[in-house]
Structure formats: structure tokens, C-alpha cells
């Protein structure tokens, strides 16, 4: 079994990020006023000292005119002495961390600590691959052999172009709204949003789909630790209704094992995510710790930073929380799909969500 840490294995996968210097996680906030630069430097360096996985300070901090333009022009090598970078433009602060040692949860945690500095070291980061329980893996492997047999692929695109493209748009959905619908449906916000996505996929699949979903991958003991804890959970769905989707997700979650371990233990899983594998639709609702007092910046489209944790053989759809708890709908897709059909997918997702919301209001 390959015990290479998850973050490093991401960079080595065929079809993974083409440029390791651009594979980063981002987190930005608008402060009430421009901060004192010396105090900000101390807070950034203290955050790195608390989380040794980020390397050693000092944190590179640049004062710029536009945080997004400056970040897009930067390079972020995974072997840098410090794996956290910062940009400041007036009251706007943007943090950039290499994705091999961070995730969206980590970025919100770092922003929170910069605003309210803490002393002492945080709980140590332990890569899930090195800490998995062999007994759980042995019990789960037969389930994954069944779930990942004869996986249906998405309908092929008709665009014929190489590379990827990205769409970002306001969804009109809020975290509060999703939570209220979930309570009415006796489910979770993630499941009701996943149900809307499964319904939206209708024209691209043939009655059944395997949707790789990204989970935050953290135990309660990891909530205050920076690191790449994200995990990948393939969920096989048939009827796209809240009840069946809830049961399918719960069953998959009960058999969750670290994704690199799954790839090694189940050959058909490895084949699914290899470069040139079948087209799949990945789904994620980005989860972050409570950020009271934090007004997050919305990531603009076309930034050219980041990249999917999985090789995108088809498309990756995610919901990104922003100011006021509203979600931005984000879609990265292979250009073998036409932009018009991908925009239609985003529109269908919002429409299907509104249908689920209406059903909840009538319940």
C-alpha cells in the first residue's frame, strides 16, 4: 500500500494539477479598517508558529493595489520555506496556502487566528493515510467493490476542445435556507443540496450516477488544526429524492476510508480517477468553522489558482460560502463540454433547489 501523504499524492496523480506552484487554497476577508502592518505581520507569523505544517516564518506579506490580481500573478512552490503567503490592499486581506498542507477549513481557521491571535501550538496535523485503521479498511473494501462495479459515466461532451473552464455565479441559496429545508425534510443541508445536484444531472446521466463528494474529513479533535483533511467519498445514486439520497450517502459515509487507501485497495476506484477515466460529476459544499465577525471575500472567476483535489475527467461542482451566508455556485469542467450546456447545468441546479425548497414549504 502506498503510504505517501494525501497532499503529495495529489501532485503525483496523472491528470492532477498541471502546475504545483498554482495549487493553493485561498481565504480572504474585508476588515473594518486597514490593519496595522506590524501587528498583522506578528499575527501571521504567530499563526505559522502554531501550525508547523505551514513551514517556518516569516510569512511573505505584500501590500498591493488588488489582492486578486497580485495573487494571480504569484507563484507558490510546495517546497517553499513558508507555505503561507499574504496580500493586503487597504482593508482587504487575502491568505494563500499551498493546498498540500491546507484546505478551505484551514483558511477560515487561519483568518480567525489572525484576527484573534492565539498562543501555543495547535494540535498536531496527522495525515489520514498514516493514521487509518486497518480493521475499518478490511470491513469497508467489500462494500466499495460492490458500489464501484460498472460505474455509469456521464454523457460525453460535444465541444471537442482541450483544457478546462470555470463558471462562478451567485446561487441565491443561503446556509440558513439549506438548514431550514433540511430540518423539514429530516435530513442534512449537504444531502438536500446534493439531491438538487443529482436532479440537475438528469440530461447528462442515464438514471444512475456515481458522484464523488468531498467531505471535510475532520474528527472533532482536528477542528483547530491546519492541514489537508479533505476526503473523497463516491456516492452511488439512483432515485434523486431526498430520502434515497440520504440513505445512499449515509451508507457510503459509514464505510468511509481515506481516499488514497481506497484507490490502493479497490482497483476499479483507481481506474475511475486516473487521467482519461470515465467522466464523473464531483460535488462539494465547502465547510468552514464558525467565522463570527468575518466578512469573507468572494473569489472571482478566471483567477487561475487552486484546482480540483481530484483529476477532473468530467466536471467538479461546488458551493462556496460567502458574505451573509450566501453560496456561490462554482463549476469547473472539461472543455469537451460546451459552455452553454454547463451554464444550463448550473441553472438546472438552482431550479431543482427551488423545487425542493417549495416542497419543504408545503410539508
Image (spheres, grey):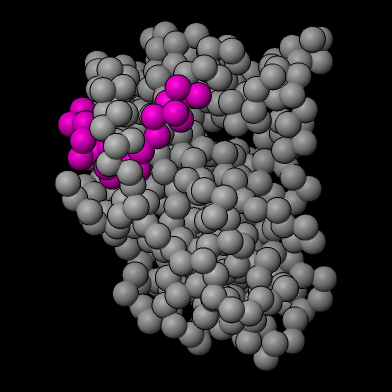
The picture quadrant where one finds residue 160 is top left
Q: Is residue 161 above or below residue 49?
A: above
148 drawn magenta: no
The image quadrant where one finds the C terminus is: top right
| Residue drawn at (52%, 80%) of the image | 49
Q: Position of residue 103 (x, y in %)?
A: 49, 56
**Stretch in magenta:** 249-268
What residue is at 74 percent from the left and 12 percent from the top? Answer: 359
Q: Main secondary structure of the magenta part?
A: helix
Q: Is residue 251 magenta?
A: yes
Q: Quick check: 168 left or right of 231?
A: right
Image: 339 above or below 216 = above
Seen from the viewer's position, the closer of residues 163 and 20 is 20
Residue 12 vs 64, above or below: the answer is above
Residue 168 visible in the snapshot: no
The location of residue 102, given as percent across then percent down, is: 46, 61
In this view of the protein, can residue 214 be seen by the observer? yes
Residues 140 and 302: in front is 140
Is 308 displayed left or right of 295 in the figure?
Answer: left
55 on left or right of 38: left
Residue at the image position 30 percent from the left and 28 percent from the top: 139
* Residue 174 in picture, x, y percent from top left: 74, 37
Amino acid at each position: 500500500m502506498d503510504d505517501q501523504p494525501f497532499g503529495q499524492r495529489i501532485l503525483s496523480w496523472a491528470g492532477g494539477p498541471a502546475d504545483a506552484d498554482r495549487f493553493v487554497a485561498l481565504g480572504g476577508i474585508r476588515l473594518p479598517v486597514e490593519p496595522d502592518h506590524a501587528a498583522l505581520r506578528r499575527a501571521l507569523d504567530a499563526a505559522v508558529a502554531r501550525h508547523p505544517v505551514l513551514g517556518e516564518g516569516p510569512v511573505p506579506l505584500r501590500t498591493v493595489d488588488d489582492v486578486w490580481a497580485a495573487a494571480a500573478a504569484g507563484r507558490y512552490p510546495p517546497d517553499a520555506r513558508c507555505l503561507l503567503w499574504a496580500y493586503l490592499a487597504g482593508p482587504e486581506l487575502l491568505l494563500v496556502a499551498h493546498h498540500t498542507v491546507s484546505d478551505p477549513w484551514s483558511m477560515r481557521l487561519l483568518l480567525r487566528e489572525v484576527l484573534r491571535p492565539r498562543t501555543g501550538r495547535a494540535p498536531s496535523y496527522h495525515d489520514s493515510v498514516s493514521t487509518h485503521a486497518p480493521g475499518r479498511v478490511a470491513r469497508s473494501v467489500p462494500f466499495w467493490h460492490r458500489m464501484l462495479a460498472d460505474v455509469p459515466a456521464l454523457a460525453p461532451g460535444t465541444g471537442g476542445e482541450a483544457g478546462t473552464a470555470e463558471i462562478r455565479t451567485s446561487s441565491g441559496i443561503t446556509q440558513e435556507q439549506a438548514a431550514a429545508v433540511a430540518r423539514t425534510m429530516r435530513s442534512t443541508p449537504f444531502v438536500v443540496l446534493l439531491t438538487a445536484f443529482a436532479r440537475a444531472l438528469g440530461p447528462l446521466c442515464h438514471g444512475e450516477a456515481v458522484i464523488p463528494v468531498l467531505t471535510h474529513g475532520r474528527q472533532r479533535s482536528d477542528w483547530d488544526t491546519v492541514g489537508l483533511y479533505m476526503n473523497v467519498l463516491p456516492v452511488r445514486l439512483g432515485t434523486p429524492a431526498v430520502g434515497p439520497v440520504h440513505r445512499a450517502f449515509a451508507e457510503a459515509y459509514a464505510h468511509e476510508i481515506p481516499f488514497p487507501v481506497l484507490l490502493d485497495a479497490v482497483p476499479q476506484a483507481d481506474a475511475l480517477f486516473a487521467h482519461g477515466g470515465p467522466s464523473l460529476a464531483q460535488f462539494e459544499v465547502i465547510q468552514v468553522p464558525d467565522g463570527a465577525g468575518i466578512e469573507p471575500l468572494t473569489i472571482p472567476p478566471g483567477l487561475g489558482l487552486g484546482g480540483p483535489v481530484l483529476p477532473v475527467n468530467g466536471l467538479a461542482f461546488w458551493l462556496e460560502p460567502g458574505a451573509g451566508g450566501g453560496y456561490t455556485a462554482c463549476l469547473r469542467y472539461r472543455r469537451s463540454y460546451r459552455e452553454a450546456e454547463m451554464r444550463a447545468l448550473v441553472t438546472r441546479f438552482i431550479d431543482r433547489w427551488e423545487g425542493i425548497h417549495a416542497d419543504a414549504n408545503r410539508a
